Structure formats: structure tokens, C-alpha cells
Image (spheres, rainbow, N blue to C red):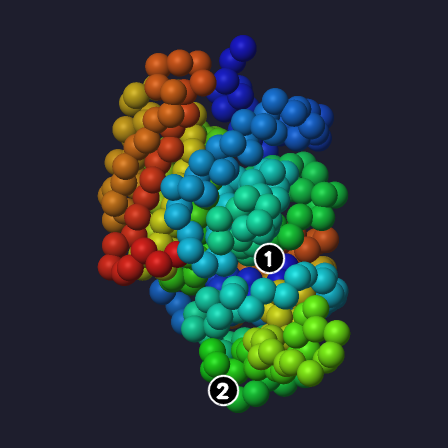
Amino acid sequence: MSRPEDTLPPDLFYNDTESRKYTTSSRIQKIQSDMTHRALDLLSLTHSSLILDVGCGSGLSGEILSASDAQGTPAGPHVWVGFDISASMLGVALEKEVDGDLFLADAGQGVPFRPGTFDAAISISAIQWLCNAESSEESASGRLSRFFNGLYASLRRGGRAVLQFYPKNDTQKTMISSAAIRAGFGAGLLEDDPGTKNAKTYLVLTVGGGELDG
Amino acid sequence: MKILTLNFLTCARKLCKSSNTAFPLHPQDAELEIVEQDMNVEFLRNILPRLMWEELSGVVGELGLPALPPTVPTLESLTEKKLKAAENDPTGMNVVEVEVPSQVALDLHRLLLETCVKEGKLVCGSCGHEYQVREGIANFLLPGHLV
Ligand SMILES: [Zn+2]
């Protein structure tokens, strides 16, 4: 099977049929939910927070962010804002009446929030899409730099971002993490189950200059 | 989109990055709705120091909502102590002190987290770009030449 991001841009790939397929597959839901919990553990939030979800899709991660501490979301419930480039994915989120605010937006165009807005950011299986340049007007490195610069500015000092993604290869992994570092982040790459077909890559980013107080 | 979010959202265009009129965006032809949420004092306490109160007051005025107090409420004003009967006390003689959300907190919660722009547009005061909001979802996709 070819990787979806190699065939079509995400707004075309996730049409209504694909969005529904993606959202109703219980296997995908389980993986997505596990990765969201893992990302939340890595964020180590201690207060109910304002969180950006990059590539929120149909709100699978958002539903976890909106859950309470007693339901298994550390320091939850959190308030979140979700970006997605696919209108059909957002349509599914709307039908589910998720609690977060939804934006039809391309993270590769930047993060339009004033400095220090978010306590944290999370992204599950999305940022590899940023490496696609869909027209001659833009380059993958330009999109990555606009995203990471915007993300850096929109996070509070001491804030964190955990971005799980599926790198196509080591070159792409390096390209993404070095774009984050150039934007000013402290960055670490974490791999769960490395070398297996279940390998998962998490880019853990910190914004210096403050206490990690959630 | 929550009124809370409007207190953080800016124009997405690069040319507006350094403009001081690209925030806040101005709602126009807005249709509002109330979406109930559980009260969360801890979140309010977290977000209160980050609010830009004057800009929030401006947006509240533009939406035709009741005016806000002139200054941002203090963190202390979000809760109040209340005496209530102790549980499992059939005599009703014993009271305990509990901390509950104050009216200030309830009003803030209503405005920031439950009052939402359902339809309309958000207009940048710097470049005039209009961002459409449909069914609560704002469209921030920019045509390539505006990025
Ligand atoms: Zn503008």
C-alpha cells in the first residue's frame, strides 16, 4: 500500500468516504488513543490547560483531551483548539459534537495565535504531511519553518509540544526535527518499539525560559 | 468558536504579523449560540492572567453582549467560601466550609467557554481579510499568494 501522503494532499485524500473509514476503524481508534495518552504522559500537564491539536482530524485525540482526570486524562479536562486541513474530517468532528474549537487551517501556513497562547500542543500522525509541497509556490522547508516558528511563538514560556508522526525515512525525520530546533525549540526524538512495524516516533519539544508548570 | 478563542486568535497573513491591529479579529454578522460546558474553575484560574481584557471588552461590545467590568477580575474572586451542612449528619447541627465557584467565575465561564460564534465572519483590522465561520468552524486556509 502506498503511503497516503505520497498520493494526494490531505484535503483531497481525506474525502468523506476516507474520513468516515478512518474514524470508524476501531484498530485506528485504538492506536490513535494509545498514542494520545502517550503524548499526554510526555506533556506532564499539572493544570487544566489550553492545548493546540495540530491535525485534529475528526477529534479522536480531542475527546481524550476533554476527558477528566478520573477518566484517565492527566490534569483534565483540558480546553483545546484543533486545526485540520480536511473539511470532511472536521465534518465528522462536528457530528460528534466535540468540545474543542475547530479550524479549517493548514499548519504549513503558520499558527495564527498571539504569543504565549497555549500551555501545550499535541499532534498525532499529522506533521509528516507538512513535508508535502503541493504547488510550486511553496517548499517543504518553507512549510516546516512557518509551522515551527508559529508553534514556538504561540506556546507559553515553559510550554511543551509532543508531536507523534510517521517519518518516511531518516532524512525526513532529521528534516522535521532540525526545523523545530531552528525555530528555537529544545527537541528530543523518542521512539517506541523501534525497528518493528509498530515503531512510533514522538518529537518532544520544549520552550525555554520558564518553569515546566503545565 | 468560543469567545475565549477570539481573545487569542490573530490574522494569519504574514504581512499582519507585526501589525498591532491584526488582533483581535472583529466579528461581523455574527450569530451566537450557547453550548453548555462543565464549570472548570481550575481552567479559568489558569487562563485569566493570559486574557487581554481590554480587547475582550471590545469584542463583547461588538457582539452586543452586556459590558464587562472595567478591570480583569482577581484570581481570588473566582471562588467563594460557603457553609453547608455536613454530609451524613442527621442532626443538621454541623456545618463545613466549602469552596464554590463565585458569580464572577460563573459569568466568565458563560462568556468565555459557553458563548460561541456559530455563523458570521472575523475581519482583520489591519488588512481587511475576512475569515468565514460556518457551523462554528472558522476557515483559516489562505490562498497561496496571501500566506
Ligand atoms: Zn490581516
Instruction: Answer above or below: position of B103 versus A131.
Output: below
Q: Is mark 1 within 8 Å of ligand 1?
A: no
Determine whether the residue tagged by mark 2 lies in a helix, strand or loop.
loop
**Residue at x-position 52% and y-position 64%:** B43
Instruction: Answer above or below: position of B53 versus A172.
Output: below
| Residue at the limit of the structure toward the front, as seen here | B91
Residue A45 horizontal side relative to residue A67, left or right: left
Residue A53, position as x, y percentages in the image: 50, 45
Residue B134 horizontal side relative to residue A118, left or right: right
Return the chain for callout 2: B
Q: Nearer the viewer, residue B138 or B74?
A: B74
Return the chain for callout 1: B
| Residue at the limit of the structure toward the top, as seen here | A1
Residue A47, position as x, y percentages in the image: 45, 59
- The quarter of the picture where residue A29 lies is top right
Determine whether the residue tagged by mark 1 lies in a helix, strand or loop.
strand
Q: CA distance from mark 2 to mark 1?
A: 29 Å
**Residue at x-position 49% and y-position 38%:** A37
Q: Earlier in the sequence, mark 2 or mark 1?
A: 2
Mark seen at residue B131 = 1
- Closer to the camera: disc 2 or disc 1? 2
**Label 2 sits on residue:** B71
Residue type (three-letter) at the residue carrying disc 2: Thr
Q: Nearer the viewer, residue A167 or A65?
A: A65
**Residue at x-position 62% and y-position 70%:** B109
Instruction: Answer above or below: position of A61 versus A6.
Output: below
User: Is the Cβ of the residue at disc 2 closer than 8 Å to that at disc 1?
Assistant: no
Residue type (three-letter) at the residue carrying disc 1: Tyr
Q: Residues within 10 Å of mark 1 (few under 14, many from 20)?
A: many
Instruction: Answer above or below: position of A123 versus A171.
Output: below
Q: Is residue B16 visible?
A: no
